Amino acid sequence: AAADPVPAAMPVLRVRPRAITAAMARQMAQAVFGDAPLYEYSTEMSRDEIAQAITLWENALSDEAIRADHGEDLDQAYVDDVRQSRMEILDYYRNAWPLAREEVTPIPCQWRFWPDEHYVIHGHDYAGTDPSYTDAFPFGTSVTLRATATVDGAPFELWINNNETASFRNHSLRVFLLVRDELYGGDGDQAEREARQKAWYGAIGAYADAPATAEQLAACAERAERLAADMGLGAWRFTARVHDRSDLPYGGYQILAEGEPIYEGFPVSVQTQLSDMRSTAPGAQNLYYETLRVTCSNDGRLLDLDYCSPMEVVEVLDAAAPLLPQERADALALETMRAWTRESLIPGYSWWHDVRVRICTAQIDSVRVGYVRQKYDDTDFLLVPGVTFRGELSVRGTYGDAGPELDLYMPDEKEQTLLVLDLRDGRPLSFRNG
């Protein structure tokens, strides 16, 4: 259905992950939310609300209250443990009461990053003792910026995380609908709650009753490309598809647009994760591929956005690496796929000696030319020219010689990356299950 031409040459790039700075965060938020004001994410409580919480937890300390919540047959040691935990919560609220405001009003977004604990420990630091950061994130910390905004009557949250810990380093941004707790709890039975959820999602146009048309899919992909550029993320190529959520009691249809970043005019192809990605070396970059996923309603309204692992080019290793011609690449792909074995197709099963593969069919839907990422060292990656064959794989066979023929390969998704070849020499770089 779609085959990219193979150019005569492509650059080879060395790239490195970069953290999301406060300036980048502002530009991203402006592109997503426009002129809508952003406020600091907080679950801060007023002085009266804290007083009510103090009364609640004071009444929850007795043996009778604990057993009523956790079971009448609890042994005394467990009851004492629960009481100790509740006393610690009570102490928190008692200490917070004199520092709390009489009336809680939203605070404009300060564009500062905080340690994760700032948002995790009871949702607010009433003493104001948390350190904050702007663009200099100490190694060994995970810092987060969270904000809220309302666009066309729909509440959203913005989460940006820079994880600089030794065991895992990653940088990401997420925008999503802020669903009110009362939609999933509150009064009424399950049917009533589901009716509330469906009415709320319907009011903001989150789901459609029918799948998007081809024109709506194309419009969503185009909007995602403009959004990425406005966010300062450079050029991207998006593929939009129908996102079926009709299995949810309040759901329906949406559009999911998945992007590939473009470097030096060529996209970075979709790959499976590298087996040697993680490293325990000090300062190692353990992260996912640079990805951008945009979920929209059928009429193009933004509902959800995920951006992971921003990268920057630090070196051009080869300005024009010569590539194999298209015909040679196609021939090598056929040779490689015809050489697949049982272990290549379905690796790691203990019952291999009973499996008989009768037929394997690889239906190639698209041939994509672009960059393929390879691990370079503990901090950097290479973008090398590659050709990616995407489509559907079918493996049928039997358990034993006389058993019924069955599907032996059950993919998580319909279309997958089946094979990636290095366009410089034709070496296989990855296979979906290899």
Image (cartoon, helix red, strand yellow):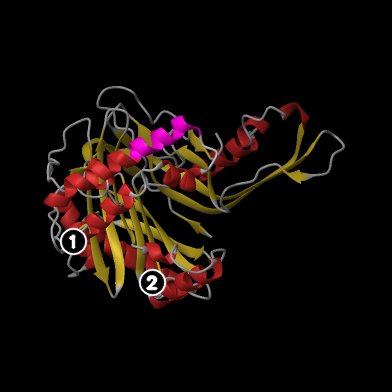
Q: Is residue 408 left or right of residue 222?
A: right
Q: CA distance from mark 1 to mark 2?
A: 30 Å
Which x, y percent locates residue 215? 44, 75
Q: Amino acid at mark 1?
A: Tyr
For residue 80: magenta?
A: yes
Q: Quadrant of residue 16?
A: top left
Mark 1 vs mark 2, foreground winner is 1
Which x, y percent locates residue 83? 37, 38
Q: 349 above or below 163?
A: above
Residue beneath the point at 46% across and 32% down: 76
Which x, y percent locates residue 289? 36, 42
The residue beneath circle 1 is: 39
The residue beneath circle 2 is: 219
Q: Quadrant of residue 205?
A: bottom left
Residue beneath the point at 26% across and 51% down: 54
> Is most of the magenta stretch helix, strand or loop?
helix
Residue extending farthest to the right is 402
Q: In terms of depth relative to the viewer, which is nearer, 218 or 91? A: 91
Q: Is residue 348 visible?
A: yes
Q: Is residue 169 left or right of residue 196?
A: left
What is the quadrant of the C terminus in the image?
top right
Q: 292 above or below 70?
A: below
- Where residue 150 is drawn, which disc sits there? none
Q: Is residue 341 left or right of residue 41?
A: right
Q: Amino acid at mark 2?
A: Ala
Residue neighbourhood size for the residue with mark 2, other residues' Cα within 10 Å, grouped as few (<14), some (14–19), many (≥20):
some
Which x, y percent locates residue 178? 33, 62
Q: Is residue 252 visible?
A: no
For the magenta stretch, what is the residue range? 75-85
Q: Is residue 406 left or right of residue 272?
A: right
